[in-house]
C-alpha cells in the first residue's frame, strides 16, 4: 500500500509536464497540473512521514530499465529528508498557484509548472537513491532544473553571469562528489550503497580520509559552506520566489543528506580532526554568513546569506557529532547529530516561510530593497504576522522551532568539556560561544529586517499602497508558520523519531536522558505563556492616541526613521575587518569649492573571498589559457606543421624505443 | 623465369627509386602544373607496382585496383586539377615558404629519416625495405608539402601524395587492401578533390587570393 503510494508519487511528478502539454489548450483543465503536483506532494509527505515515524523500508529497483544500476531505497534517513522535501513542497506549490498566475503567462507559466515538479523529483531522487548512479543522476538534474527555473525570470547579461557562476561551482562540486564515489571502486564490488557500506571496513585510513575530504568539499559546495558559498547569494535572489524558497530551504539540505550519508553511514565517523575540520567550517560559515547578511539591504540576498549562516550551524552540529564519536561518546554524538538534523528541518520550514514572505512583499510592492519598504504590517496583517513568526524562529526564540535545535546544540557543546581529550574539551565549549555570537548577530539582523520592512512608515509610494496578497499565498505561509510554532511547542513529534534515526546511524545503545525534558517542558511553558497572554489581553487599558513627539519639529517623515544601513552600522563598525568596504566619494563642484553641485557616495562591500581567493584562481587559469592560445595562430599551415612534427617525433621515438 | 616475371621483379625492386625521384622533383617544382604532372607520374609508378603484385599473386582484385589507380589517379584527378588551374586564371606559383634548395634538402632528409625509421621493422617482418621506406617517405613528403606550400591547391596535392603513401604502405605490408576498401578510398579521394576544387574557387572569390596563410580570421 505505502509502496504503491510511493511509486505513484514518483510517477505523478514525472508525468506532470506531459499532462501540462495536454491541458495547455483548454482553459478548463489549466488548473490540473498544479492540483496534481499538490496531490503528489501530499502523498509523498504521507509516505515519507509513515516511513520516518515507523521505520518502514521502501524499495524500488529500476535496474531492468536502465543501462546502469538504478535503485531507490527509503530508510529512515532518506525518509526524513523526503519528508522535508514534500512538506516544504506543499506550501510552496500552494503559493506558486497564485504567484505564477499573477507574474507569468503563456509559455513562462508552462515552463514553471513543467520544471517545478521535475526539480522536486530530482531532489527526491537524490535523497532516496541507493546506487551511486541514481544519486549522481538526481544530483546533476537538480542543478540543471534549478538553473532552468532561474532562467524563467529572464536572461539578461548580469543574470546569465550569476547563473554561469552557479553552474560552474555546482559542476565543480559534482566532480568532487563523483570522485568520492569512485574512490570506493577498488574495495566495493558494485556501487550500490549496501556494498559501499560493507567495503569501508577493508579500506586503509588514507583512502577513507580522501573520501571524507572529497565529499566534504563536494557536498560543501552545494551546501554553501565558506569559501564555497560564492554562488549562493548570486543564484538564490534572482530565482522566482517559490523557487528560491525551494533552493534555499530544500536543495541545500540534500547536500547535508549526502554528507551525513557519506560520513556517518558509510564511513562511520573517523579521527577527531575530521570533526575539527567540520566544526571550523561550520563556525566560519555561520559567522561570516550572518555578518554578510547583516549588511544586506536586498531582502532575498539577506535571506540567502542567512541560509549560509544556518548551514554553518548545521555543520557545527555535524562536527560536534564527529568529535564525540571519535572520543567514544556515542550518546552525546547522537544529541549533536539530532540537533543538526532537527535544525535542517527547522531551517527548511522557516527559510521557505521567509522566502515566500519575500515573494509576497515583492508581489505587493514590486521591490525587494528593504530601504524602500516600511510600515507593511499595517497594510499586510497576515503576511506581517507570519513573517514575524519566521523571524522569531530563525533567531531561535523559545516556543519557536529554531530554539529546540540550537538548545540541543548548546547542550552538547557544553557537555564537550567533559571529554577526556584536552583539545576537544577546549574547542567544543568554545564553539558554544561562537554559536551564541551567531545567534546574537542573527537577532540583530532580523530585528533590522523586520523593523525596517514592516514597522515604521512607508519609505516609498509602492510600500504605501501595498495591499494584502491573495488567499492561497497567505494560506501557504500560514501553513509553514503553523508548522514552525507546532515544532517549537511540541518538539517531541520529530525529536523522538530523529533520536531513533541517530541511534541507528551511531549504533548507540542508550538514549540521552538529558535532552528529553525539553520536549516535556516546552508544551508546559507554552501553556503558561498562553495563559499570561490571554490574561494580559483581558485587562482593559485606557487608550490615548497622540502624535509622536518630533523634538519640536512640525512633522515626522519617513526619512527620519532608522534606515537599514543605520541600524547595522554599530555592528559593522565592530566587525569592520570582515567587511573591507570600498568607499568612494565623488563631489562635483559648480564653480567654487564651497558649494558642491552633487555628492555621490558609494560603498561597495566586496566579499574578500571573491577578491583574494577566486579572482587569483580564475586569473591564473585564464592566464594559462591565453598563453596556450598562442599555439592557435589561426594559420592553417602551422596546424599542419604541428601534425607533421608530431609524426616525425613519433617516428624517431619508435626507432629508439 | 619468363620475361614478364623478370620485368615485374625489376619494376618492384626499382620503383622505390623512381618514387624518390618524383618526390625530390616535386620539392624543387615551382609551378603547380609541374606538380600535377609529377603526381600523375608517381601514380603511374604505383599502378605498375600494383600490376606487378597482381601478376605475382595472381589476384583479380589487385588488377581491378591497378585499373582504378590508372583511371582515378593517373588520369581523372590530374585532369580535374588541370581544369581547376586553368579556370582559376591565377598565378601558377606554388608559393613555397622554403626556397627550392631548402625544400630539396628537407625532402632528402625526410627520405633518410624514413629509411632510418623502417629499418628494424623491415628486418623483423621480412618486408622490402626500400618500398616500405618509400611509403613512409611519401607520407612525410605529402605532409611537408601541405605545411610548406601556401597555395590551397598545393594542400590538395600534399593530401594526394600522402594518400599514395598510405596505399603503398598497405601494398608492401599486406599486399593490398580488400577491393571494397580501395574503392571506398578512391571514391573518397575523388570527392575530396571535387570539394577542395569548389572550396578553392570559393576562397578565391571571397578573399581574392589563394594563400591559406592569410586565412587567419577563422580562429576563435
Image (cartoon, coloured by chain):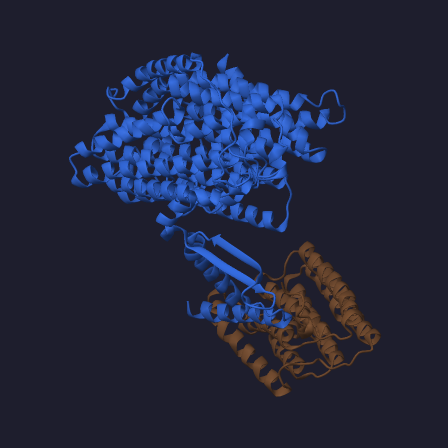
Q: What residue sits 30% from the left and 19% below the top?
A: A518
Q: Quadrant of the C terminus of chain B?
A: bottom right
Residue A315 is drawn in which quadrant? Answer: top left
Closest to the observer, A101 or A69: A101
Residue B38 is drawn in which quadrant? Answer: bottom right
Residue farthest along the bottom direction in this orientation: B101
x and y percentages locating residue A176 in the rendered image: 42, 45
Task: Evaluate whether residue A499 shows in this view.
Answer: yes
Closest to the observer, A394 or B14: A394
Closest to the observer, B194 or A357: A357
Q: What residue sits 32% from the left and 36% below the top?
A: A435
Q: Quadrant of the N terminus of chain B?
A: bottom right
Above or below, comparing residue A584 to residue A182 in the picture: below
Q: Is residue B208 left or right of residue B166?
A: right
x and y percentages locating residue B117 in the rendered image: 49, 72
Chain letter of the brown region: B
Q: Is residue A535 left or right of residue A512?
A: right
x and y percentages locating residue A173 in the rendered image: 45, 44
Closest to the observer, B188 or B68: B188
Chain letter of the blue region: A
Amino acid at each position: 500500500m505505502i509502496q504503491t503510494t510511493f511509486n505513484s508519487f514518483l510517477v505523478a511528478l514525472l508525468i506532470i509536464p506531459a499532462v501540462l502539454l495536454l491541458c495547455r489548450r483548454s482553459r478548463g483543465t489549466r488548473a490540473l497540473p498544479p492540483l496534481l503536483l499538490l496531490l503528489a506532494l501530499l502523498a509523498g509527505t504521507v509516505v515519507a512521514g509513515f516511513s520516518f515515524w515507523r521505520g518502514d523500508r521502501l524499495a524500488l529497483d529500476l535496474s531492468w530499465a536502465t543501462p546502469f544500476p538504478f535503485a531507490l531505497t527509503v530508510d529512515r534517513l532518506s525518509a526524513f529528508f523526503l519528508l522535508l522535501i514534500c512538506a516544504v513542497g506543499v506550501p510552496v506549490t500552494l503559493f506558486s498557484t497564485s504567484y505564477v498566475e499573477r507574474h507569468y503567462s503563456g509559455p513562462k507559466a508552462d515552463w514553471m509548472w513543467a520544471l517545478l515538479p521535475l526539480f522536486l523529483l530530482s531532489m527526491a531522487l537524490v535523497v532516496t537513491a541507493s546506487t551511486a548512479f541514481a544519486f549522481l543522476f538526481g544530483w546533476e538534474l537538480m542543478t540543471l532544473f534549478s538553473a532552468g527555473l532561474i532562467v524563467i525570470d529572464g536572461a539578461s547579461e548580469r543574470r546569465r553571469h550569476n547563473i554561469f557562476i552557479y553552474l560552474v561551482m555546482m559542476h565543480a562540486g559534482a566532480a568532487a562528489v563523483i570522485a568520492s564515489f569512485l574512490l570506493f571502486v577498488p574495495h566495493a564490488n558494485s556501487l550500490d550503497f549496501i556494498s559501499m557500506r560493507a567495503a569501508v571496513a577493508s579500506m586503509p585510513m588514507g583512502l577513507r580520509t580522501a573520501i571524507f575530504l572529497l565529499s566534504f568539499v563536494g557536498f560543501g559546495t552545494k551546501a554553501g559552506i565558506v569559501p564555497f558559498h560564492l554562488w549562493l547569494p548570486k543564484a538564490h535572489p534572482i530565482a522566482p520566489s517559490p523557487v528560491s524558497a525551494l533552493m534555499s530551504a530544500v536543495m541545500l539540505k540534500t547536500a547535508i543528506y549526502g554528507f551525513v550519508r557519506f560520513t556517518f553511514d558509510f564511513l562511520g565517523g573517523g579521527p577527531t580532526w575530521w570533526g575539527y575540520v567540520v566544526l571550523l567550517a561550520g563556525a566560519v560559515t555561520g559567522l561570516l554568513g550572518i555578518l554578510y547578511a547583516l549588511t544586506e539591504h536586498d531582502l532575498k540576498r539577506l535571506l540567502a546569506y542567512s541560509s549560509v549562516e544556518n548551514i554553518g550551524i548545521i555543520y557545527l552540529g555535524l562536527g560536534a557529532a564527529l568529535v564525540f564519536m571519535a572520543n567514544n561518546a556515542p550518546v552525546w554524538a547522537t544529541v549533536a547529530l539530532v540537533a543538526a538534523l532537527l535544525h535542517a528541518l527547522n531551517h527548511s520550514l522557516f527559510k521557505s516561510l521567509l522566502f515566500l514572505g519575500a515573494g509576497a512583499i515583492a508581489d505587493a510592492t514590486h521591490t525587494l530593497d528593504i530601504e524602500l519598504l516600511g510600515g507593511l504590517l499595517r497594510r499586510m496583517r497576515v503576511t506581517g504576522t507570519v513573517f514575524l513568526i519566521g523571524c522569531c524562529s530563525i533567531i531561535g526564540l523559545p516556543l519557536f522551532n529554531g530554539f529546540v535545535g540550537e538548545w540541543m546544540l548548546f547542550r552538547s557543546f557544553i557537555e564537550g568539556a567533559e571529554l577526556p581529550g584536552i583539545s576537544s574539551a577546549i574547542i567544543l565549549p568554545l564553539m558554544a560561544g561562537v554559536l551564541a555570537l551567531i545567534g546574537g548577530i542573527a537577532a540583530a539582523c532580523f530585528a533590522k529586517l523586520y523593523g525596517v520592512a514592516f514597522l515604521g512608515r512607508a519609505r516609498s509610494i509602492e510600500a504605501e499602497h501595498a495591499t494584502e496578497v491573495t488567499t492561497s499565498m497567505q494560506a501557504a505561509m500560514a501553513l509553514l508558520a503553523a508548522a514552525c510554532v507546532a515544532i517549537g511547542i511540541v518538539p517531541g513529534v520529530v525529536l523522538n523519531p530523529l533520536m531513533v534515526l541517530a541511534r541507528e546511524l551511531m549504533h548507540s545503545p542508550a538514549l540521552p536522558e538529558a535532552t528529553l525534558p525539553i520536549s516535556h517542558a516546552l508544551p508546559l511553558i507554552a501553556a503558561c505563556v498562553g495563559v499570561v497572554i490571554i490574561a494580559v489581553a483581558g485587562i482593559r487599558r485606557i487608550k490615548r492616541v497622540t502624535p509622536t513627539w518630533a523634538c519640536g519639529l512640525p512633522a515626522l517623515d519617513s526619512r527620519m526613521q532608522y534606515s537599514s544601513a543605520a541600524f547595522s552600522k554599530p555592528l559593522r563598525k565592530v566587525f569592520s575587518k570582515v567587511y573591507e568596504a570600498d568607499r568612494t566619494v565623488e563631489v562635483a563642484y559648480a564653480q567654487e569649492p564651497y558649494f558642491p553641485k552633487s555628492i555621490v557616495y558609494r560603498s561597495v562591500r566586496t566579499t574578500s573571498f571573491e577578491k583574494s581567493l577566486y579572482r587569483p584562481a580564475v586569473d591564473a587559469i585564464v592566464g594559462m589559457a591565453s598563453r596556450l592560445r598562442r599555439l592557435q595562430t589561426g594559420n592553417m599551415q602551422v596546424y599542419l606543421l604541428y601534425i607533421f612534427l608530431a609524426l616525425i617525433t613519433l617516428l624517431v621515438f619508435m626507432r629508439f624505443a | 623465369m619468363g620475361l614478364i616475371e623478370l620485368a615485374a621483379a625489376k619494376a618492384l625492386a626499382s620503383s622505390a627509386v623512381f618514387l624518390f625521384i618524383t618526390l625530390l622533383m616535386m620539392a624543387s617544382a615551382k609551378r603547380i602544373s609541374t606538380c600535377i604532372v609529377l603526381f600523375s607520374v608517381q601514380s603511374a609508378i604505383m599502378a605498375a607496382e600494383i600490376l606487378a603484385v597482381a601478376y605475382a599473386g595472381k589476384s583479380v582484385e589487385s588488377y581491378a585496383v591497378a585499373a582504378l589507380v590508372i583511371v582515378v589517379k593517373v588520369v581523372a584527378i590530374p585532369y580535374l586539377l588541370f581544369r581547376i588551374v586553368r579556370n582559376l586564371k591565377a598565378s601558377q606559383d606554388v608559393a613555397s615558404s622554403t626556397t627550392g634548395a631548402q625544400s630539396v634538402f628537407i625532402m632528402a632528409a625526410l627520405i633518410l629519416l624514413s629509411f632510418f625509421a623502417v629499418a628494424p621493422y623491415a628486418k623483423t617482418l621480412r618486408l622490402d625495405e626500400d618500398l616500405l621506406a618509400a611509403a613512409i617517405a611519401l607520407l612525410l613528403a605529402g605532409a611537408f608539402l601541405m605545411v610548406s606550400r601556401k597555395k590551397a591547391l598545393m594542400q590538395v596535392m600534399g593530401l594526394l601524395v600522402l594518400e599514395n603513401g598510405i596505399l603503398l604502405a598497405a601494398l608492401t605490408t599486406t599486399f593490398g587492401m580488400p577491393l571494397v576498401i580501395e574503392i571506398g578510398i578512391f571514391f573518397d579521394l575523388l570527392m575530396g578533390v571535387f570539394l577542395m576544387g569548389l572550396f578553392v574557387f570559393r576562397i578565391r572569390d571571397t578573399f581574392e587570393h589563394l594563400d591559406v596563410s592569410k586565412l587567419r580570421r577563422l580562429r576563435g
